[in-house]
Image (cartoon, rainbow, N blue to C red):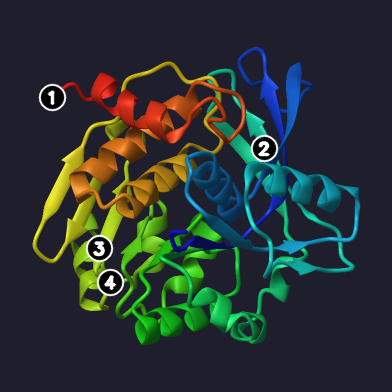
Amino acid sequence: MSNPVFCIGAAFVDELFHVTDPMMIGTTNDATVTRTAGGVGRNIAHQLALLGVPVQLISAFGNDSDAVWLKRICTEAGIKLEASINSEDFSGKYTGILQEDGSLFLGFLTNPANYLITPEHLDQNKELLKTASWLLADANITIVAIEWLLSFSRQTGIPLVIEPVAVPPARKLQKANLNGLFLITPNEDELPAICSGKAKSVEQQIEELLKRGVQQIWLHNGKAGSAFYSGEKHLLLQAIPIGVLDSNGAGDGSLAGFILGKYLGKDDLECLKLAHTLAAEILQVNGAIASHLDQQTLLALVSKYYPQ
């Protein structure tokens, strides 16, 4: 069996309230509600498992019915939870308010359990982590856990990808030793949060991260697509023009698509096309997971969206 991808990060219950008419502030809005399994690390692990990639999730689950439900969904998808943590706390929950067009208006997060993903816990599972082909950490976990993973990646040569998640968790990376980091994946808001105040423009921020030892930066630009930077190359790829039903999880899906491409040995541009294709499919369904896709179907869709 091929070595698994390890995803280290959040597992939440996602509750999404989707307003049915234009948003009105300060009053009641009619909405529909969906409840799905979420969390950045968990979402990426789930999507990879559905795409035929062996995957392990290191996350923290509470002692409640939400945890039972979340773990059942993970195991049914094919995610292994050998190194995950069971706590006496409540499970995490993300509540999102989506506008009529599916874009996020406001989000709320309760994350009482992830402090348990400590360097000590990771060190106890070091031999299992050594079996990884790739490591992915979302910035919901503590900076000391991220720094342990950065050191572990440098020592073992197992490539590490960091997903900043949002501006507040991205700020914890501002002073981290990112030397040797294989890839970081900010959007336009998260990029300056990772950098010092001296770097004002996108170009200066990219240059600062490269000087800090980050090997590659994948900048997400929303409807404008994405840009991929390394010391010797700069790739641009336009977003796929599609109608958006639900924006939740599209960024997680794009990273799952990219990691799938790397897992299959594809080059950077092919990985970006896979990433954009998977994100486009997720934008057209409710929830953060494209459960209608397997690996073969996704690979075939790339040529549909990018016929050249």
User: What is the three-letter code of the residue carrying label 1?
Assistant: Gln
Q: What is the total number of numbered labels drawn onto the structure image?
A: 4
Q: Reply above or below: 291 against 138.
A: above
Residue under label 3, please give it.
Answer: 216
User: At numbered mark 4, what does the secondary structure look like: helix, strand or loop?
Assistant: loop
Label 4–label 3 contact, CB within 8 A: yes
Q: Nearer the viewer, mark 4 or mark 1?
A: 1
Q: Nearer the viewer, mark 3 or mark 2?
A: 3
Residue under label 2, please give it.
Answer: 96
Residue under label 4, please give it.
Answer: 214
User: What is the three-letter code of the residue carrying label 4?
Assistant: Val
Residue at position x 45%, y 83% in the image: 152
Residue at position x 63%, y 21% in the image: 23
Q: CA distance from mark 2 to mark 1?
A: 37 Å
The spot of residue 3 in percent (x, y) is: 45, 63
Furthest toward the top, the residue is 21
Q: Earlier in the sequence, mark 4 or mark 1?
A: 4
- On the image, which quarter does residue 220 sit in? top left
Other-residue count near label 2 (Cα within 10 Å), few / some / many at <14 / 14–19 / ≥20 = many
Other-residue count near label 3 (Cα within 10 Å), few / some / many at <14 / 14–19 / ≥20 = many
Residue under label 1, please give it.
Answer: 308
